[in-house]
Image (cartoon, helix red, strand yellow):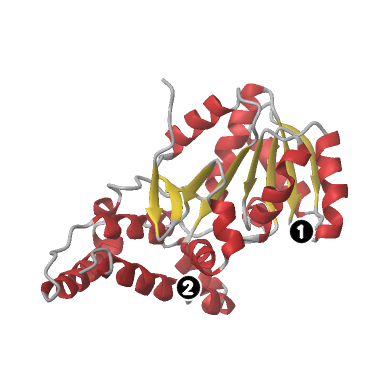
Amino acid sequence: MNLKRKKINILGVPIDTFDKITSIRYIRQKLDSNQPIFITTVNVEFLYRALNDEAVLSMLKKTSLNLADGIGVIWAAKYLSLKLPKDKFTRPIVAFLKLIGSLLAIIFYPKYLRSEIPEKISGSDFIWDLSRLAAEKDLKIFLLGGGPTVPEQAALRLQTEIYNLKVAGTFEGSPKPEEEKKISETVAKNNTDILFVAYGVPAEELWLERNLKKTKAKIGIGVGGTFDFLAGRTKRAPKFFQAIGLEWLWRLILEPKRFKRQMALPRFIKRVFIHKLREIKY
């Protein structure tokens, strides 16, 4: 079956509504084309950045897949789909009540939120799916970014867990423009098929936008702090936190310095609420 992208518009940012299995099927289908597949995993912090940075927003409009990485994005898709009365007096009240109800559903009834986007897909999880695909299709992966020895350790972990996985290479590097030519040539010379980039959001995605074609890789995806998880440098949240979409809260508990970054969440909720109220012009 020929799959077509199913996107939902969240404040001008296109987010794909595929679950993980369908995403992999779509990628398999696209592998036969001559165009590189550029994948992003978008959480609230990333999405909010796009609302305030034209370069990031423009990049997200040109990717192959923008997967929802977090309950905040899934919540926004659901809330924006809810119907509100047209009456200008009752509309704000109903909108606010539905806002509170949908936010409470994050904890108490997460299944309710998944009618628009069925599943959270993080880079930390999707790297395994793409690596298994690589092993199956005899493709080579390349790990770019991370601290000293981190990409090597992450690659070793993937190879240990996935039989017949081939690693084209690893390199730390940086997203600095003056290093792009050397890095792109290195990735290309190693006959890379799938490129994982860990420079942090949105530097890694902007790097891929500029350089993915130059690397000649078939697939490129930014994976944030995934190499640190794989290398054992950072501990992932317990399965319970991952399941309910509150992995960000676990990381905030472990790293209080992330508090300033997490302020994007209440600001994002406010933007979504205001947008919802303004959907109908009087």
- Res 234 → quadrant: bottom right
For image coordinates 54% across by 67% down, the residue present is 49
x%, y% of residue 111? 26, 51
Query: If the image is split into quadrants, where does the C terminus sit?
Result: bottom left
Q: CA distance from mark 1 to mark 2?
A: 24 Å
Residue at far top of view: 1
| Residue 245 appears in view | no
- What numbered label is drawn on residue 139? none
For image coordinates 63% across by 32% down, the residue present is 162
Q: Which residue is tagged 1?
A: 175
Residue at far front of view: 282
Q: Is residue 53 above or below residue 197?
A: below
x%, y% of residue 248? 48, 65
Q: Is residue 13 above or below residue 97?
A: above
The kind of residue on which mark 1 rests is: Pro
Disc 2 crowd, CA 10 A, few/some/many (<14, 14-19, 20+):
some
